[in-house]
Image (spheres, rainbow, N blue to C red):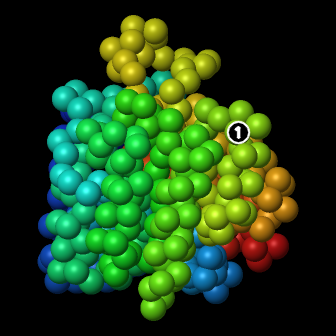
């Protein structure tokens, strides 16, 4: 309540990317002081046996994580864990560092509890990100969201995914293949069945040869139709991947409350937050039904509060992730969601 009434209005006076950097930097700084870790655990943790989940062979202390894009370069994962999240998905990571799109590239739509971003997969590159993970041992489950460099042609994309996969293999717990980011030119062409099978099969073949096989998930666009979703389920069974992340951001701008001028200023990019909630839930429910619940789904998209989180789980999601809901709801969102889940499990 304090965050939403006092701190958020102040933070929203500033450019979103600036606020993001400031907030995670302050989080990291405060946790360096003696006793603060204990205080954070008291404030933000809820530990209950009925919150534990084992999904694609990994044990999660609770089902709530941070979606990719928040900790792009693996710099704040342990600090985010102090806010009660059981897993952090880093990235999207590309083989080579890239600056992303010119600023401004992130915009708020407060009337819709939404964000529009056209970041362009800015990151420090796979080698440096892997080194960050080696330097500071994670106290949280790490997902590695991987993609191709913007300048890599699609016919060479598989090489970028393989490079990221190999570089990050020892330092992450699971992988997410991102072929659905709306901020990279013609990346949606990678969702072509033959191309996607080639990428996923190549990664699965590498994983099988390792001492420990790591789960591989596919991140799905909310803008696909049922026929395309059917095709992805078939591909998942045929390639043997371990799950889906549903969904990415959307290019659609349906039924927004924000003034058309405000939306126009934000321009092209991926929309996240409350307007994505229903579509994301529909896709989760569809995937679970189509796969007969044999393919786990991480639900993400429009989770702004406990009710939204429970809705995703009721639709069949095994785990959930937040991003925009964290921005609008503040640092206590994981605890609030986990308390609601635990209470529901007790009934």
Q: Is residue 7 visible?
A: no
Tell me: residue 52, above or below residue 295. below
User: Which of the 4 image quadrants contains residue 26?
Assistant: bottom left
- Viewer-side residue, 110 vs 99: 99
Residue 251 % position (x, y): 51, 27
- Residue 119 in view in this figure: yes
Q: Quadrant of residue 153?
A: top left
Give the residue drawn at x 33%, y 63%: 164
- Can you give x and y, in whole percent of width and height, for residue 136 in the image? 21, 80
Mark 1 element type:
helix
The residue identified by callout 1 is: 228
Task: Identify which residue is drawn at 53% across, 56% down.
Answer: 198
Residue 20 image offset from top left, x and y in percent: 25, 47
Residue furthest bottom as drawn: 211
Residue 79 appears at what percent x and percent y? Answer: 29, 70
Image quadrant occupied by the C terminus: bottom right
**Depicted 154 relative to depicted 318: above or below:** above
Question: 242 or 20, which lies in front?
Answer: 242
Q: Nearer the viewer, residue 165 or 219?
A: 165
Q: Find the residue positioned furthest to the top.
A: 261
Q: Categorize mark 1 by other alpha carbons within 10 Å: few (<14), some (14-19), many (20+).
A: some
- Count numbered badges in the picture: 1
Residue at 73%, 54% in the rendered image: 233
Along the line of sight, the residue nearer the viewer: 335 or 98: 98
Q: Please report the residue visible at 35 percent of the width from the left and 20 percent of the height from the top.
A: 266
């Amino acid at each position: 309540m304090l965050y939403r009434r006092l701190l958020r209005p102040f933070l929203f006076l500033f450019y979103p990317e600036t606020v993001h950097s400031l907030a995670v930097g302050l989080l990291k700084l405060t946790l360096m002081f003696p006793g603060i870790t204990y205080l954070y655990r008291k404030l933000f943790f809820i530990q209950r046996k009925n919150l534990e989940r084992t999904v694609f062979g990994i044990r999660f202390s609770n089902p709530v994580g941070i979606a990719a894009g928040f900790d792009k370069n693996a710099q704040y994962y342990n600090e985010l864990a102090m806010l009660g999240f059981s897993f952090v998905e880093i990235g999207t990571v590309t083989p080579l560092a890239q600056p992303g799109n010119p600023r401004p590239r992130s915009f708020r739509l407060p009337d819709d509890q939404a964000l529009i971003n056209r970041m362009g997969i800015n990151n420090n590159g796979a080698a440096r990100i892997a080194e960050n993970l080696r330097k500071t041992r994670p106290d949280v489950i790490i997902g590695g969201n991987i993609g191709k460099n913007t300048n890599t042609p699609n016919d060479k994309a598989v090489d970028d995914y393989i490079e990221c996969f190999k570089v990050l293999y020892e330092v992450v717990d699971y992988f997410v293949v991102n072929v659905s980011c709306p901020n990279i030119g013609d990346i949606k062409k990678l969702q072509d069945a033959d191309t996607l099978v080639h990428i996923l099969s190549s990664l699965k073949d590498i994983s099988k040869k390792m001492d420990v096989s790591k789960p591989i998930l596919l991140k799905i666009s909310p803008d696909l139709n049922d026929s395309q979703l059917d095709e992805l389920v078939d591909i998942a069974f045929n390639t043997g991947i371990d799950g889906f992340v549903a969904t990415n951001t959307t290019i659609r701008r349906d039924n927004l409350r924000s003034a058309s001028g405000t939306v126009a200023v934000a321009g092209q990019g991926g929309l996240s937050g409350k307007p994505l909630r229903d579509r994301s839930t529909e896709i989760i429910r569809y995937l679970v039904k189509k796969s007969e619940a044999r393919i786990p789904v991480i639900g993400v998209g429009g989770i702004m509060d406990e009710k939204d989180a429970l809705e995703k789980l009721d639709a069949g999601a095994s785990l959930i992730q937040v991003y925009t809901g964290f921005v609008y709801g503040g640092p206590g969102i994981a605890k609030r969601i986990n308390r609601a889940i635990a209470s529901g499990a007790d009934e």
